[in-house]
Image: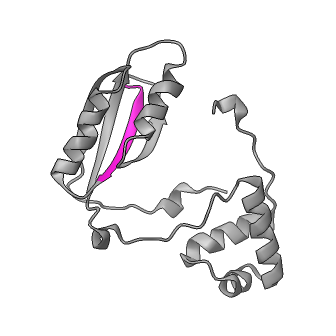
Amino acid sequence: MTIAQISEVELDDVDRRIIQAMLKEGEFNLEKIARRVEVSKSTVHNRIKKLKASGVLKGMLPWLDLDKTGNTITAISLIRAKYGPQYAEEVGRKLAAVEGVWGVYFVLGENDFIVLIRARTKAELEKVIESFTKIDGVERSNTAFALKVIKEDFRESVRI
């Protein structure tokens, strides 16, 4: 998907408040969301159904404490790719397909991509990084290993 193919869905104030309440609550509970937004449960239900149908909501994910799941290694790789036609989409798609990769960003500057990685062990992290070198179009990677997570709250990344 290219940037030109992405179309923005019109969200009204109630839609925004429902999404914010879902993020704040950390769970999918119609009654709690309806109370927080000050609308009926049926309104919340219908709005969520509409948001799913429009593609705004892609699903309902559980909010996990990653320290308790064993996914304690966080790493950030800066990837330099060979410039060519459609390289952003092609290399980006291949990076995104690597198991353990949870974020891929095409960026401007010295590097072409920022890749976010989660792993259980150093060996698992090494496997992810080695798989980058096997991707046609990747020139090199530079990976930083996070020693300590100071803040990580995906809710802060959502601006609606």
Quadrant for the N terminus, please.
Answer: top right
Task: Name the image colouring.
Answer: one colour
Q: Is residue 107 left or right of residue 99?
A: right
x and y, in percent, of residue 74 in the image: 28, 53
Q: Is residue 81 above or below residue 44?
A: above
Res. 48 in view = yes
The residue positioned farthest toward the left in the image shown = 123
Residue at (67, 67) in percent of width and height = 19
x and y, in percent, of residue 96 in the image: 44, 39
x and y, in percent, of residue 118 in the image: 32, 53
Task: Specify the segment rendered in magenta.
Answer: 111-118
Residue at (27, 27) in percent of width and height = 133
Q: Is-magenta flag for residue 116?
A: yes
Q: How many marks?
A: 0
Residue at (72, 69) in percent of width and height = 17
Q: Quadrant of residue 16?
A: bottom right
Quadrant for the C terminus, please.
Answer: bottom right
Front one among 93 and 149: 93
x and y, in percent, of residue 107 in the image: 47, 30
Q: Is residue 100 left or right of residue 32?
A: left
Q: Is residue 50 above or below residue 117?
A: below
Q: Is-magenta flag for residue 85?
A: no
- Looking at the magenta stretch, what is its main secondary structure? strand
Res. 39 in view = no
Residue at (34, 29) in percent of width and height = 79
Q: Is residue 148 left or right of residue 96?
A: left
